[in-house]
Amino acid sequence: LDRKDEFGQLADSLNQMADRLRADNLEMKRMYQKQSQFFADITHEIRNPLHTISGALEMLEMHDLDEDQKIKYIKTASRQTHRINRLFKDLVTLQRYDSDDHFIEKKPFDLQLLIHTLQELLEPDAEDKGLSLICETEPIRVLGDPNKIEQVLENLISNAIKFTNNGHIRLNTKEKTDSVIIEIEDTGIGISKEHLERLFDRFYRTDKARSRDKGGTGLGLAVVKSILNAHGTEIHVESEPGKGSKFWFKLDKV
Ligand code: ADP
C-alpha cells in the first residue's frame, strides 16, 4: 500500500509540474506574440511617414515646381519627420518605464502653476478649432514629478482638442482630504464601450486613419498610464459616443 501511495504522490507532483510547464509555455508564447505585434506596429508606424517623406522628396527632385508647391512638399516632409521623432520619444519613454528605470523624481509642486503654463501653451491649438479651454483650479501643492505630470496633462489635453470638433475642454481639480482629483473633460466625439478596455494599450486607436491624420502616434495614452503607474496612481476614463469623454486621476496632496 505504501508503494502505491508513493507512486500516487509521484504521479501527482509530476502532473503538477507538467501543468506549470504548460502554463509557463503559454505565458511565453503570449509574451512573444505581444512583442512581435509591437514590432510589427512600430515598423508600420515608421514605414508610413517615411513613405510620405520619400514621395515628397522625389517630387522636389524630379519635377519643376513653383515656390508654393515646393513649400507644400517641404512642409509635408517636415511634418512627417516630426511624427517619427515623436514616435521615438514616446517609445524611449515607454521602454524606460518597462525596464523599471523610472527616473521619477517626486517633489512638492504647485499644480495650479503647472496647469496655467499648459493652458498658455495649448490654448492656441484649441482656439484654432474654435474650442475653449477652460481651467478651473485653485492653488494646490501636490507630490509628484512635475515634468512627468506635465507630460500626462499635455497628452490628455491634446487628445481632448484633437477629438473635439465643437464645444469646450474643461480641466478641473477637486480637492479631497489627502489628495486631489484632476479631471479633463471634453465635448468631443466620445469613445464607445468596446474600445474603453484597450484604450491604454500601445498603438490602440479607435480610428487608425483619423489618429494618423491628426499626427497621433497611438502611444499617448500608454505613456500617460505608465507615468501615472510609476507615481502609484491610475488613469480612469468615462465616455459616451457623440457626447464626450472624461479622463481623471488622483495625486497626493502635500
Ligand atoms: P493618438 O492620440 O496618438 O492616436 P493615444 O494613445 O493618445 O494615441 O490615444 C489612443 C486613441 O484613444 C486615439 O486614437 C483615440 O481613438 C482615442 N482617444 C483618446 N483621447 C480621446 C478623447 N479625448 N476623445 C475621443 N477619443 C480619444
Image (cartoon, rainbow, N blue to C red):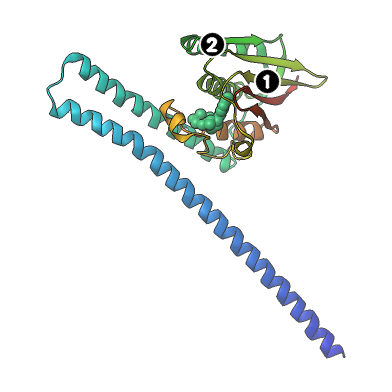
Which quadrant does the C terminus fall into?
A: top right
Task: Give neighbour class at mark 1: few <14, some 14-19, many 20+ (Cα, 10 Å).
Answer: many
Q: Is residue 207 left or right of residue 246?
A: left
Find out whether the residues at labels 2 and 1 contact each other: C-beta distance under 8 Å: no
Residue 58 position, x and y percent, is: 19, 31
Q: Residue furthest front?
A: 242
Q: Is 219 in front, or is 147?
A: 219
Residue topped by disc 2: 131
CA separation in Å, label 2 and label 1 = 18 Å
Whether residue 96 is situated above or below residue 149 in the rendered picture: below
Q: Tally the numbered discs.
A: 2
Q: Is residue 73 left or right of residue 202?
A: left
Residue 107 position, x and y percent, is: 67, 22
Sequence-wise first label, 2 or 1: 2
Q: Quadrant of residue 147?
A: top right
Q: Residue furthest right?
A: 1
Task: Give neighbour class at mark 2: few <14, some 14-19, many 20+ (Cα, 10 Å).
Answer: many
In the image, ligand 1 is in what quadrant?
A: top right
Whether the residue carrying mark 2 lies under 8 Å from ligand 1 is answered with no
Q: Secondary structure at mark 1?
A: strand
What residue is drawn where x is 68% and y is 25%? 248
Q: Amino acid at mark 1?
A: Glu
**Front position among marks 2 and 1:** 2
Which quadrant does the N terminus fall into?
A: bottom right
Q: Quadrant of residue 3?
A: bottom right
Q: Secondary structure at mark 2?
A: loop
Whether residue 218 is situated above or below residue 109 in the rendered picture: below
Whether residue 140 is situated above or below residue 14 in the rendered picture: above
Residue topped by disc 1: 183
